[in-house]
Image (cartoon, rainbow, N blue to C red):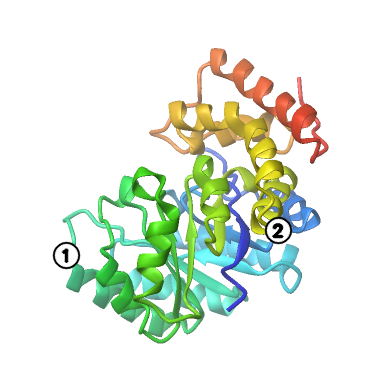
Amino acid sequence: MTLFRGLSAFPLTPTDAEGHVDAEALGRFLDRIHQAGADSIGLLGSTGGYAYLSREERKRAVQTAVECIGGKTPLVVGVGALRTDDAQALARDAKSAGADGLLLAPMSYVPLNEDEVFAHFVAVAEAGDLPLCVYNNPSTTRFTFSDELISRLSTVSNIVAVKMPLAANDDFAGELARLRQMIPDTFTIGYSGDWGAADALLAGCDTWYSVAAGLLPAPALALTRAAQSGDAMTAGRLNHAFEELWALFKRYGSFRVMFVIADLLDLAHVQPPRPLLPLPENAWGRIRQALEVLTTDAGADNFRLGA
């Protein structure tokens, strides 16, 4: 399964204040990722604000993406929803529109147990009938997948990958070795949490599910390829160029920071969905500086900084 390998770039879904997708701006994001050569696009992930969009707007986003990059860059679509039947409908929508794969997180209000999560994933995987990646995102969903549950899900038809949070104590090699003893050889393991991506890739993970690559695909891809090749020196240099951005992600949340980056790069002038508020003006200068460091030190992207 090559769909869930390499660099998967997760763009924002630009909308107006009423939650209507700006198809033109989304197309600019997607074309930028495609032109950089990312291995896949993760549409409607957490960075894509899927939880804030109606079913119709999510369909509009997928249709826009397929029109823009369908058949050129593989498209993975997030289909998380509180109800199983809603997630099933979203999975069918994504397939009908032309998505190549699905990403599913266990959204909930009442905390879920492992049997409930397993049944939810089986139902959505069957409905979508596309390769599906398990989204283990405990910082947002408040549900942590055990090794045993990941192993159990890896035996389900269509479930072929997992997107993990950063490993405890940065022990990526140990976690990968432990999980790979429990899953099929074809089941891929990737990580989110951009500031740990270089270490995870150097340890041998299959995929970097990247927030930064949604708007900064070229330097993210350069880092990915260096780490995949085992070139720790180059990967370390490129990761160092990202360090200020990683610090900002940790301080403010990557989702909020990405809206500022979109504005500074003059790609879209949109705001986070309420109740989230835009970052204060004093954060913008640091974000601009982080982009300038990437331009100078990574030398891997052509930025157009707006006023």
Quarter of the image that includes the C terminus: top right
The residue furthest top is 282
Q: Secondary structure at mark 2?
A: loop
- Residue type, label 2: Ala
Where residue 171 sits: x, y (%)? Answer: 40, 50
Does the rendering let one see residue 232?
A: yes
Residue at left offset 42%, top offset 32%:
276
What residue is pinned by disc 2? Answer: 38
Whether residue 248 sits left or right of residue 306 in the image: it is left
What residue is pinned by disc 1? Answer: 113
Residue at left offset 50%, top offset 38%:
255
Marking on residue 276 = none
Q: Residues within 10 Å of mark 2 (few under 14, many from 20)?
A: many
Q: Gap between marks 1 and 2, in whole Å? A: 35 Å
Does the rendering let one see residue 216?
A: no
| Front-lying residue, 119 or 85 | 119
Where residue 152 sits: x, y (%)? Answer: 29, 78
- Residue type, label 1: Asn
Whether residue 274 sits left or right of residue 113 in the image: it is right
Whether residue 119 sits left or right of residue 5 in the image: it is left
In the image, residue 231 sits, relative to residue 86, either above or below, namely: above
Q: Earlier in the sequence, mark 1 or mark 2?
A: 2
Residue at left offset 70%, top offset 55%:
225
In the image, residue 185 sits, relative to residue 255, either above or below, namely: below
In the image, residue 187 sits, relative to residue 228, either above or below, namely: below
| Front-lying residue, 239 or 27 | 239
> In which image quadrant can residue 184 be found?
bottom left
Residue at left offset 48%, top offset 55%:
191
| Front-lying residue, 299 or 272 | 299
Q: Secondary structure at mark 1?
A: loop
Q: Residues within 10 Å of mark 1 (few under 14, many from 20)?
A: few
Whether residue 263 sits left or right of residue 140 in the image: it is right
